[in-house]
Amino acid sequence: MDNTTAGRFTASANWGTSTYSAQRYGADYRYANPVAASDTAWYKVNIPATATYRVEVWHPAVAGYNTSTPYIVATTSGNQTVAVNQTANGGAWRSLGTFTLAAGDANKVGVSRWSGSTGYVIADAIRVTRV
């Protein structure tokens, strides 16, 4: 699911659109400066049944991007946060781990701007696969 998938991605006006890196998934990706505030970009996923799923993310890697971008996964036991270094290992699927996700069509994976590191946080694409 890309940041351009209709009805599946939401972000505030604080998130810009970029084509800067060729490591992007699809035509473009979204970026924002880190801030100590709740301004999460969300991916809405239709989970067919409550079960265990592998959550993967795709982002371009650029030296000036964030070294500790918080990805939020909405699990059956509450939100879990996984920090990703977006200066390395870009242009490929990266696993955040496996999580129990509840059935339903809702915001399941988010990219938070609330990072203690400098550099843009990136929201590009996610993939959720039942395991």
Image (tube, rainbow, N blue to C red):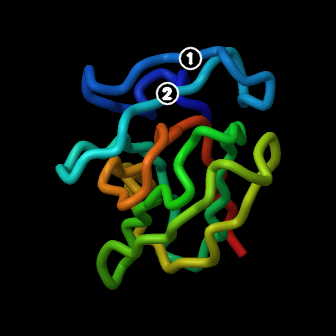
Q: Residue 3 location, x and y as percent? A: 53, 29
The single residue placed furthest to the left in the displayed view is 37
**Residue 53: numbered disc:** none
Q: Is residue 89 left or right of residue 58?
A: right
Q: Earlier in the sequence, mark 1 or mark 2?
A: 1
Q: Residue furthest bottom?
A: 77
Q: Nearer the viewer, residue 86 or 7?
A: 86
Name above or below for residue 24 compared with residue 116: above
Q: Is residue 12 above or below residue 17?
A: below
Q: Left or right: where does residue 44 sit relative to residue 24?
A: left
Task: Categorize mark 1 by other alpha carbons within 10 Å: few (<14), some (14-19), many (20+).
Answer: some
| Amino acid type of the residue tagged 2 in the rendering | Arg
Quarter of the rendering occupied by the C terminus: bottom right
Q: Nearer the viewer, residue 130 or 78?
A: 78
Q: What residue is at 58 percent from the left and 25 percent from the top?
A: 29
Q: CA distance from mark 1 to mark 2?
A: 6 Å
Q: Quadrant of the N terminus?
A: top right
Picture coordinates of residue 91 (x, y %)? 80, 40
Front residue of 117 and 44: 117
- Give the side of residue 66 with respect to residue 89, left or right: left
Q: Tell me where residue 85 appears, x and y as whole percent.
A: 62, 58
Give the amino acid type for the residue marked by disc 1 in the picture. Answer: Ser
Instruction: Say which element carries label 1.
Output: strand
- Mark 2 crowdedness (10 Å alpha carbons): few <14, some 14-19, many ≥20: many
Q: Is residue 82 left or right of residue 74?
A: right
**Labelled disc at residue 30:** 2
Q: Secondary structure at mark 2?
A: strand
The image quarter in which residue 95 lies: bottom right
Asked whether disc 1 touches disc 2, contact meaning CB atoms under 8 Å apart, the reply is yes
Q: Position of residue 74 (x, y in %)?
A: 37, 66
Instruction: Say which residue appears at 54% left-offset and 78% top-offset.
Output: 99
Pointer 1: what residue? Answer: 18
